[in-house]
Structure formats: structure tokens, C-alpha cells
Amino acid sequence: MINTAVILARGLGTRMRAEGQSSSLTAGQAAAASLGYKALMPIGAHRLIDYSLSALADAGVTRAVVVVAPEHEAFKAHVRELAPSRLRIEFAVQDEALGTANALASAEKAVGEEPFLMVNGDNLYPLEALEAMTHVSGNAIAGFERSSLVAQSNIPAERIAAFALIRHADNRLIGMIEKPSEAELAEYGESAPVSMNLFAFEPTVFEACRTIKPSARGEYEIVDAVLALENVQVVPVSGGVLDLSRRDDIADVESRVAHVSVRL
């Protein structure tokens, strides 16, 4: 069983910093939004990352490696305040925001030689999906059912349509495409699973992260690293994923987790 998770929380938060529907934000939320802090966004009595850490602990994770920027005193202070007892929290520094594969590669030393989960710091995943991924062997990607994402997430269908699609045969990955066009959506089909950046990895992924080339936008993409691996399992999952990318997302996410118990 996998008991380590890597949480990518280094992003620049460009969309979050942009002006949006912010009239309903608290002073703390507005301050966090202006700095692009998504994982540290105040949500109810907690921060967004607290809900993620609690769910990971519920799934059996006992150690979390949080990928952060060089200036991460706010994260350190928050962890000291949390004083978690259910899991150990460590930090890995990504010097520059050079993409998700580069962010993951920065956690190699902290992770060591054991399998681990990788999750986005601005997403909250259903417990059932996390539990399923902690029990896989080898490299795996969670393939979310599109209809359940649309029905149970706070993410509009048009945004979900831009997420990476998974092509598989006998639950083995044979292709992925990011930001698919309408023609590519039709080619993959409505039943094609959607990637929400929930992975189970063996340490071999770090070598893949080092060998890929930058994408057209100059970043090292986790999709390219995954496609460079051999024999990646696709784990079918259903359920909604909460996404906190924009200021407009804050109120909806807050209402959806209002009755969620956080235990750290």
C-alpha cells in the first residue's frame, strides 16, 4: 500500500491573481488570492490544503511531500500551526515554475525509493479515488468518468472539456492528449476518461521527468513524462473533483466542504 503523497503547490496562481468575482471574499481570501495562494486559501475554518491532507490521511497516507517555491515561509508557519499527528509533512523546493514534471522531479530526494501518489495542490479528490490509487502496483493514472465530473464537481463542463483525455486498452495507457480540440474530443469519444492529475508512481517516473523536452509553452509537462513510461495502468474512478483555480471558485468550494471534517 502506498503511504507517501506528493502535493504540487508551487504554481504561480496566475488565474487566481487575476481579478474575478471577489466581492464575497473575506479579507483573508482576498489577500491569498492577490498572492496567488491556492493551497493556502482560507476555506471555512481551514486552508484548502488541510482538506487535501485530511483526505490523504483517511486514505492511509502517512507522509506528504509538498512542492513549494523557494519562498515558502507561509507554508512552514501553517504546518507548525497545524501540528499534524496523522501524517508527517515535508517540503521540496522547485526553484522555478517550469511545469508539473519539473515540480515532481524536485521532490525526488524527499520521496526516496518508494512508490507514491501525486496530486494537485489546488484540487480536492474524492476519498474513494485516493483509496483506489493507494492500492495499485506500478505506475498508474486515475481516469475520471466525464459524466460524474460534470455532475459532481464545481468545474463547468466547458472547462472539463479542456482537460487531458486518456486513451487506453484493457486499462493500460496508450495515449493522452491535453487541451483537446472538438475534433479530438469526438475522436476519443464521450466515454474517454479524463485526467485530473491524480497518479500513483514508482520512482522510475523521476528519470522520465528528466528526459522529456519542454512543451510548446516552454514547460516540462507531467503528461509527457507519463507517456514516456512503460505499462501505465488506468484506474477507472468516478466522482467529483473540486478545483480552486480562480477567485470565482472560492465560494462554491467553500459551500461544498462546509460539512467536511478535517482531521490532521
Image (cartoon, helix red, strand yellow):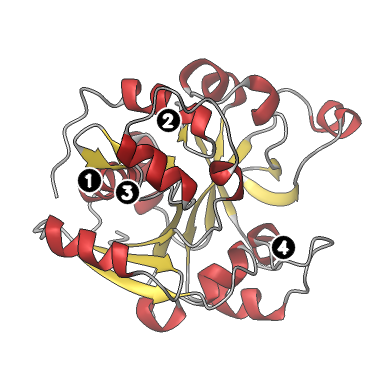
Relative to the observer, which residue lies in front, 61 or 31? Answer: 31
Tell which circle, 4 or 1, labels the residue nearer the N-terminal end: 1
Q: Residues within 10 Å of mark 2 (few under 14, many from 20)?
A: many
Q: Residues within 10 Å of mark 4 (few under 14, many from 20)?
A: many
Q: What is the spatial separation of the Cα atoms under label 3 and label 1, in whole angstroms?
A: 8 Å
Q: Residue at x 22, y 59 (%)?
A: 78
Amino acid under disc 4: Asp
Q: Residue at x 14, y 50 (%)?
A: 264
Residue, disc 3: 49
Relative to the observer, which residue lies in front, 249 or 262? Answer: 249
Q: Is residue 89 visible?
A: yes
- Does dot 4 land on a helix, a strand or a loop? helix
Q: Does the CB distance between marks 4 and 1 fall below 8 Å?
A: no
Residue, disc 2: 250
Q: What is the spatial separation of the Cα atoms under label 2 and label 4, in whole angstroms?
A: 30 Å
Look at discs 3 and 4 and give the one toward the viewer.
Answer: 3
Residue, disc 1: 54
Amino acid under disc 3: Ile
Look at discs 3 and 1 and give the one toward the viewer.
Answer: 3
Tell which circle, 3 or 1, labels the residue nearer the N-terminal end: 3
Find residue 224 and name its label. Answer: 4
Tell which circle, 2 or 4, labels the residue nearer the N-terminal end: 4
- State the image coordinates of residue 96 (x, y, percent, origin top left): 58, 74
Measured along the vertical axis of the image, is residue 81 above or below residue 182?
A: below
Q: Residue at x 70, y 31 (%)?
A: 192
Measured along the vertical axis of the image, is residue 202 above or below residue 37?
A: below
Q: Does the CB distance between marks 3 and 1 fall below 8 Å?
A: no
Look at discs 3 and 2 and give the one toward the viewer.
Answer: 2
